[in-house]
Image (spheres, rainbow, N blue to C red):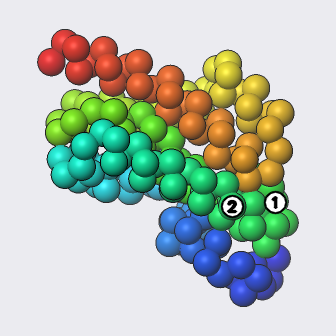
């Protein structure tokens, strides 16, 4: 890591690492995805789907820029320290569902992480072929989109 990564892009580093979660040992992507659950569960109970989708769009767009600048500061395009993309992916998986219950948010979390790690098509293709901040975020958006199917199935049977 570049010695002055925080000073080179402090705002981007803060958001891209989700307040420093990206620097935790073990599984920072999983930690960030778990941290994303509380806000999306709250939003599912407070805001209508259109407002949640709008907020997701803003966070996704900003995440591309934060990931780009943090990647430059870290001198790693898709650093494991950049975990804002996991937040976006979990939110994509759950944004369409109202009043999230624990089976739904758990399904979204697990399905997103499985698709994010396994990287089936198109997740893997996006991960390999889309460069920079856009590539960092876009593969997680695709993993979240695939996870919507699992959440929808659980929602249907509940």
Image quarter for residue 74? Answer: bottom right
Q: Residue 125 placed where, x, y %?
A: 76, 26
Q: In x, y percent, where is residue 36?
A: 39, 53
Q: Residue at x 56, y 56 (%)?
A: 84
From the viewer's perspective, is 38 left or right of 54?
A: left
Q: Can residue 27 be spotted in the picture?
A: no
Contact between labelled residues 2 and 1, with CB atoms less than 8 Å apart: no
Q: Residue at x 19, y 12 (%)?
A: 157
Among numbered discs 1 and 2, the one appearing first in the sequence: 2
Q: Dot 1 surroundings within 10 Å: few (below 14), some, or many (20 or more)?
A: some
**How much space separates mark 1 and mark 2, taking CA atoms?**
14 Å
Task: Please tell me in which quadrant of the rendered image residue 22 appears.
Answer: bottom right
Label annotation for residue 76:
1
Secondary element at tag 1: loop
Q: Quadrant of the N terminus?
A: bottom right
> In the image, which disc is placed on residue 65?
2
Q: Is residue 120 visible?
A: yes
Q: Name the residue: 50% across, 23% down.
A: 146
Q: Is residue 104 left or right of residue 3?
A: left
Q: Is residue 17 left or right of residue 42?
A: right
Quarter of the picture containing the C terminus is top left
């Amino acid at each position: 890591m570049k010695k002055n990564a925080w000073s080179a892009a402090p705002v981007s580093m803060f958001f891209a690492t989700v307040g420093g979660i990206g620097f935790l040992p073990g599984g920072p992507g999983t930690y960030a995805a778990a941290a994303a659950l509380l806000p999306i569960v709250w939003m599912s109970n407070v805001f209508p789907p259109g407002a949640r989708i709008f907020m997701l769009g803003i966070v996704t767009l900003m995440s591309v820029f934060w990931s780009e600048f943090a990647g430059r500061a870290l001198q790693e395009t898709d650093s494991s320290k950049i975990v804002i993309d996991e937040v976006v992916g979990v939110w994509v998986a759950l944004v369409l569902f109202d009043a999230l219950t624990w089976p739904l948010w758990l399904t979204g979390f697990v399905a997103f992480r499985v698709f994010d790690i396994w990287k089936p098509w198109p997740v893997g293709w996006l991960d390999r072929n889309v460069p920079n901040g856009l590539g960092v975020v876009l593969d997680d958006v695709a993993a979240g989109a695939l996870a919507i199917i699992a959440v929808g199935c659980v929602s249907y049977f509940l």
